């Protein structure tokens, strides 16, 4: 199912999805056909973002190229399966911040677990790219849970005046 339909836009309607995002983080995995291993590469990149940038959950986008999509599809994995797996795997413990120079944030604050997303539904799973290999990307949220992705059909005007007759 196309992303727009998944996010409530009628089938066949053109739409746009926007989100406040950080720079895409490229990854590659051409060494496996197992969905869990392919998706672990994406989850690891998301964990890196949680460690190095922000522990606040939000919309992440996965850009899954043709080569990796084919393995996922052959194994019968759906977008919902992908999102559920990523939601469970893209988590860190607060103590991990000490390993990346953020010890002051860790001291005397417990060891909470932080998930990249509040729910699997916050993951945007996007098919893109040609057959050039297993090069995918993770697009992290810029402002975590302070902003969320929005999808609107094209031609919808917010705060516009109606056309004059």
Image (spheres, rainbow, N blue to C red):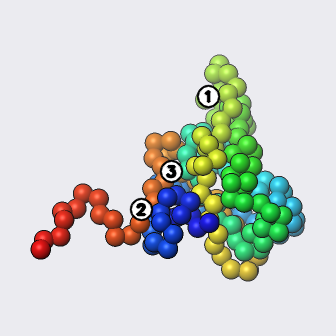
Q: Secondary structure at mark 3?
A: loop
| On screen, residue 103 above or below 122 | above
Q: Which mark is residue 152?
A: 2
> Of residues 162 and 23, which is closer to you in this image?
162
User: Earlier along the polypeptide chain: callout 3 or callout 2?
Assistant: 3
Residue at 33% x, 65% y: name it.
156
Q: Is residue 100 visible?
A: no
For mark 2, does the 10 Å Cα neighbourhood hold few (<14), some (14 to 19), or many (20 or more) residues?
A: some
Nearest-to-viewer mark from 1 and 2: 2
CA gap between label 1 and label 2 equals 42 Å
The N terminus: image quadrant: bottom right
Nearest-to-viewer mark from 3 and 2: 2
CA gap between label 3 and label 2 equals 20 Å
Q: In which quarter of the view is residue 113 placed?
A: top right
Residue at 52% x, 64% y: name it.
4
The C terminus: image quadrant: bottom left
Residue at label 1? 104
């Amino acid at each position: 199912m196309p992303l727009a339909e998944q996010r409530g836009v009628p089938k066949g309607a053109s739409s746009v999805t926007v989100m406040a995002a950080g720079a895409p983080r490229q990854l590659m995995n051409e060494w496996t056909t197992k969905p869990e291993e392919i998706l672990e590469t994406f989850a690891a990149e998301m964990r890196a973002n949680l460690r190095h940038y922000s522990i606040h959950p939000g919309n992440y986008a996965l850009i899954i190229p043709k080569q990796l999509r084919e393995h996922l599809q052959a194994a019968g994995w759906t977008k919902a399966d992908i999102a559920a797996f990523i939601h469970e795997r893209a988590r860190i413990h607060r103590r991990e911040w000490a390993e990346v120079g953020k010890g002051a944030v860790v001291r005397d604050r417990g060891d909470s677990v932080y998930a990249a997303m509040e729910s699997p539904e916050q993951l945007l799973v996007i098919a893109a790219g040609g057959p050039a290999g297993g090069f995918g990307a993770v697009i992290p949220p810029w402002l975590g849970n302070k902003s969320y992705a929005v999808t609107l059909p094209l031609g919808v005007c917010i705060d516009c005046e109606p056309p004059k007759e």
